[in-house]
Amino acid sequence: MLTISGLKNFYYIPGVTDMRCGYNRLLQIVKQMTHHDPFNGDVFVFMSKDRRKVKMVHFENHAYYIHEKVFTNGYRFMLLEYRDEKGVLSYRMDWKDLVAVLESPVVKKLRLK
């Protein structure tokens, strides 16, 4: 069960597609690349290159949290479009947008028999 509420700030970090990273490495990337404070309770969202896996990481109440969702073959997360502005390394997301991404699988291919 997802323990994150809509009262947080959510940031999508494009370009970080290595899903082998754990919470420590992902928070280091946030700090180095985006200059956000990874320890203020904001939630950072990462998506794999093939859009089958999403990781969310945040720090709250002296604890690290990492959430991961992976679709089976044939399903993906929807493609996130963002303005590719020079110097922008993170994009703010609304709670409703995050829920739409997490709960709306996109079918890659539909086989009819």
Image: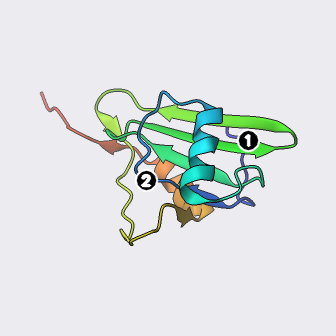
Observer-side mark, 1 or 2, equals: 2
Residue at 39% across, 44% down: 105
| Quarter where residue 82 is shown | bottom left
| Residue at which label 1 appears | 3
Q: Residue furthest front?
A: 32
42, above or below 106, in the image: below
| Quarter where residue 37 is shown | bottom right
**Residue 68 left/right relative to 3:** left
- Mark 1, secondary structure of its residue: loop
Q: Which mark is residue 58?
A: none
Whole-angstrom CA distance, mark 1 to mark 2, is 23 Å
- Say whether residue 101 is visible: yes
Residue at 39% across, 71% down: 86
- Mark 2, secondary structure of its residue: loop
Label count reads 2
Residue at 70% across, 55% down: 42
| Quarter where residue 40 is shown | bottom right
What amino acid is at disc 1? Thr
| Residue at which label 2 appears | 14
Image quadrant occupied by the N terminus:
top right
- Horizontal and vertical percent for residue 12? 52, 56
